[in-house]
Image (cartoon, rainbow, N blue to C red):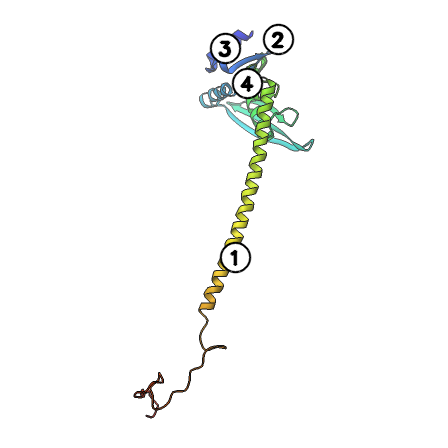
Amino acid sequence: MNYEQLTAKLIKDFGINSDQIYKLGKGFDTITVIRKVGMDQIEERLIVENGWEIKLKHMFAQPYKGRAYVGVLAIGKKDGIRFETTAGANPDNSLFHNYLEMAEKRAKHRLLLKIAGLSKYKVHSEAESKDFVPPDIGHQKAEAVAREAEKWTDDTKKFDKKNVDMSIKAMTEKLRQIEKDLDNETKKKEPVGKVGARKRRPVDPGTNDTGKPGKPSKRPGRSV
């Protein structure tokens, strides 16, 4: 089946638009690549309409040249039929550094193409390799996009750290202000009569309690 016939089949069987399909290579080495939206349409047709059940399992995650190397197993089941395939992601085969998500996407896409019977026609998902880049984009532009994504991630981490540091500083200042306010309130509520309190002068019998001339007050138990 040549590229034109395969494109017609994808459009007819899965409703994929022609702009979601492109080819790479020449002659016998030609492969057909499907973009993300096209793979989403295949997934909808197989899972939603045909009832395929797909599960992903993490096989391993280990260091690889200072970074993670992730492997994922994809399993598809329906009416006693079972398909399996695997995929991995590491710094050498991925432009982006979200290796777990990339490995999951590759495993799922490979499984979908296998269930659909398209793998035998050299049909691949665009996510399966960093070398699968549309001719209208090119590798240089793809790598530039990857660098911008990495830079944005680093800037985001720095921004988050700055916000955390500012939050801790603001919280510390707020706690200090609360302690200061509490100290002031405690000083205001101290009772009179303790050390340093003013003593009352004795009251003359010919005066009232205020010390001014007048009739003395009558208090219980006090002779006038």
Return the x and y of residue 74 as percentages of the image width and height. Answer: 57, 26
Of the residues shown, which amino acid type is indicated by label 3?
Answer: Lys
Q: Foreground mark, 2 or 4?
A: 2
**Residue at mark 1 to residue at mark 3: CA–CA distance:** 72 Å
Sequence-first disc among 4 and 3: 3
Q: Around disc 1, counting alpha carbons within 10 Å, would you say few (fewer than 14), some (14 to 19), or many (20 or more)?
A: few
The residue sitting at 51% across, 56% down in the picture is: 175
Whether tag 4 and tag 3 are in contact, CB under 8 A, the answer is no
Whether residue 73 is visible to the viewer of this picture, yes or no, is no
**As displayed, is residue 56 above or below residue 139?**
below
> Which quadrant holds the C terminus?
bottom left
Q: Nearer the viewer, residue 17 or 86?
A: 17
Left or right: 99 with respect to 222?
Answer: right
Q: Foreground mark, 1 or 2?
A: 1
Q: What residue is disc 2 on?
A: 26
Q: What residue is disc 1 on?
A: 176
Of the residues shown, which amino acid type is indicated by label 4?
Answer: Leu
Of the residues shown, which amino acid type is indicated by label 2?
Answer: Lys
**As displayed, is residue 213 above or below residue 182?**
below
* Numbered disc 4: secondary structure: helix
